[in-house]
Amino acid sequence: MHRICMASDFFYPNTGGVESHIYQLSQCLIQLGHKVIIISHAYDDRTGVRYMTNGLKVYYLPVWVVYNQCTLPTLFTTFPLVRYILIRERVDIVHGHSAFSALAHEVMFHAKTLHLKTVFTDHSLFGFADSSAIITNKLLQILLAICNRVICVSHTGKENTALRAGVEPNRISVIPNAVDTDIFMPSTDKKHSNHPNTTTIVVVSRLVYRKGVDLLAGVIPIICHKYSDIRFLIGGDGPKRIVIEEVVERHQLQDRVTLLG
């Protein structure tokens, strides 16, 4: 049995893919007989220690949130509290989630001072040129240098992480996001399709920066101009929706890109 600590700024009651991933992974590990705790930051009046299904223990730390549920990276101010939790819970593996989560990186850093094993899962794709990406990538490069193992959710994500964080590819494992094909199965009956002679690329995501929406906006016109039988069907909403709308308007792709919201 292992004692595992999941760490991220993003967890319930906030909603999203990372939050759901952490919860579901924790539940599966508990069912396999492991002890799992979660460290996140406080959400309004949700502070201190809370318990979820199957005894999943969650520490909501009183740290300062500065932007989009991300905490201010201070490194040393969280050290006494995180060290106390890791020792008290007798943790032997720390698993951090999301490149944008300063808390995840800090918990993994503090874990290495206790000679604990660390794992990091990168859930998103990021660019290289804008100021946010430059800062995030430099931070990631420093902190992943001491991480034992890195996990990405796609082979494209693996290449992206290896390039921007300077991680050796042999230290990165790929565990693709799962799709239950008993529930989500594309129809093979073309006669019920409004576009029987086209290939539809479906994107379902919150339209925010950390989901790689800027990269999506960049490739849509390239793919549409190169392949005349490609359509995009995008489900989801968020502050980056306007970026997709601007691309559609600029390249006159109204009949090729559908935004469902």
Image (cartoon, helix red, strand yellow):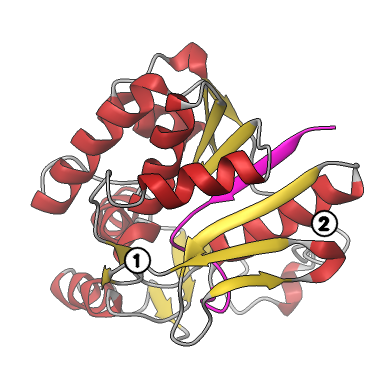
State the residue at coordinates (56%, 79%). 13
Query: Quadrant of residue 212 in the image?
Result: bottom left
State the residue at coordinates (71%, 61%). 57
Q: Say which quadrant the C terminus sits in.
A: bottom left
Magenta-colored stretch includes residue 47: no
The first of marks 2 and 1 along the sequence is 1
Q: Is residue 117 found left or right of 206 in the rendered image? A: right
* Residue 25 percent across, percent down from the top left: 72, 51
Q: Is residue 27 found left or right of 121 in the rendered image? A: right
Mark 2 lies on residue: 181
Q: Is residue 120 visible?
A: yes
Query: Quadrant of residue 255 in the image?
Result: bottom left
Q: CA–CA distance between discs 2 and 1?
A: 40 Å
Q: Which residues are magenta?
A: 1-15
User: How many discs appear?
Assistant: 2
Classed neighbour count for the residue bearing mark 1: other residues with Cα under 10 Å, few (<14), some (14–19), many (≥20): some
Classed neighbour count for the residue bearing mark 2: other residues with Cα under 10 Å, few (<14), some (14–19), many (≥20): few
* Residue 186 percent across, percent down from the top left: 74, 63
